[in-house]
Image (tube, rainbow, N blue to C red):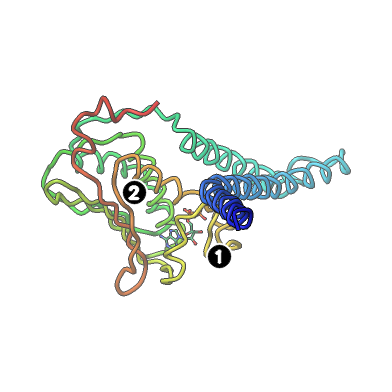
Amino acid sequence: VILITMGVFWLLSILMSVWMSRLTMRPILKSWGRQTEFVGNAAHELRTPLTIIQNKLELLLTKPNDRIIDQAENIAIANSESQRLQTLTRDLLALARSDSNTVQTNFENTDVPAFLERTIEPYTEIAASQGKTLKVEQVTSFKATLDQDLIHQLMNILIDNALKYSPTGSTITVSANNLGRKWQLSVADQGIGINAADRERIFDRFYRVDSSRSRQTGGNGLGLSIASWIVTLHHGTIAVHANQPTGSQFVTTLPVNPASGLSTYHEK
Ligand code: ADP
């Protein structure tokens, strides 16, 4: 009886330790799996433009006597693919920095409406050149503590997307509201919109609703994951809603003062 009881206890303790190790290993295995998936996706995204550039260069080498004008189309394609590579490597670096927490933040007390006006100014011309209107809804002045470079980057991503996924003749509206201890930044467009199932996933790395369309417009599916990281650094949230009657509205809610003791909030 003693031997059987000891045997049962021994078996139970082995089962317990296997179960415990599965519990502790699960997050490690999960993050390892995510990392492998990220590297796989990144390699895939890098390979496509590289293959195109290589093909175009090989084609040019087969016709050494051609003039540049004769091969302008191929050269232009190689050039736009190398620009895509540049954007992709910039975005991958940003995400690598976000994963390793190696970003030096610089939080400053900022007049939000004036900052928004300054930030979107260059985009008004780009929008006009595409036959679209970009406007900031006027609001009374208020201040919030934020990292201007990062919020600038966030706005670039949201406005860039709004322009990419909107037709000629449409309007993109940027607005900021002071809600007391929080403030909201909204970018609304009248474009193709995002269906409810995709709204859940567009903040995932490399996720694109329509990858061929996104490729045509120069997208790599990383913009919104960078946006979401910037918002997290500010202790805020980001959400997307359907805009009425068409399009999408991205709403970012941020604390007016992300942390009272900013010295403890600085990241290295
Ligand atoms: P991308 O570089 O492909 O635009 P993002 O991460 O910025 O990558 O966006 C992910 C996907 O979300 C896009 O591929 C697109 O399908 C969708 N999306 C983002 N913004 C908008 C928008 N304003 N209107 C419609 N679809 C959008």
Q: Position of residue 9 (x, y in %)?
A: 56, 53
Q: Position of residue 166 (x, y in %)?
A: 42, 63
At label 1, counting other C-alpha atoms closer than 10 Å, the crowd grade (few under 14, some 14-19, many 20 or more) is: few
Residue pictured at 17% horizontal, 52% vertical: 177
Closer to the camera in the image, 50 or 31: 31
Establish if 167 lies above or below 150: below
Q: Which mark is residue 124?
A: 2
The type of residue carrying mark 1 is: Asp
Closer to the camera in the image, 124 or 207: 207
Q: Position of residue 116 (x, y in %)?
A: 26, 43
Q: Position of residue 7 (x, y in %)?
A: 63, 54
Q: Quadrant of residue 84?
A: top right
Callout 1: CB less than 8 Å from ligand 1: yes
Left or right: residue 147 compared with residue 137:
right
Left or right: residue 98 compared with residue 15:
left
Residue pictured at 34% horizontal, 49% vertical: 124
Task: Name the residue that disc number 1 marks.
Answer: 210
Left or right: residue 248 compared with residue 16:
left
Residue pictured at 41% horizontal, 71% vertical: 196
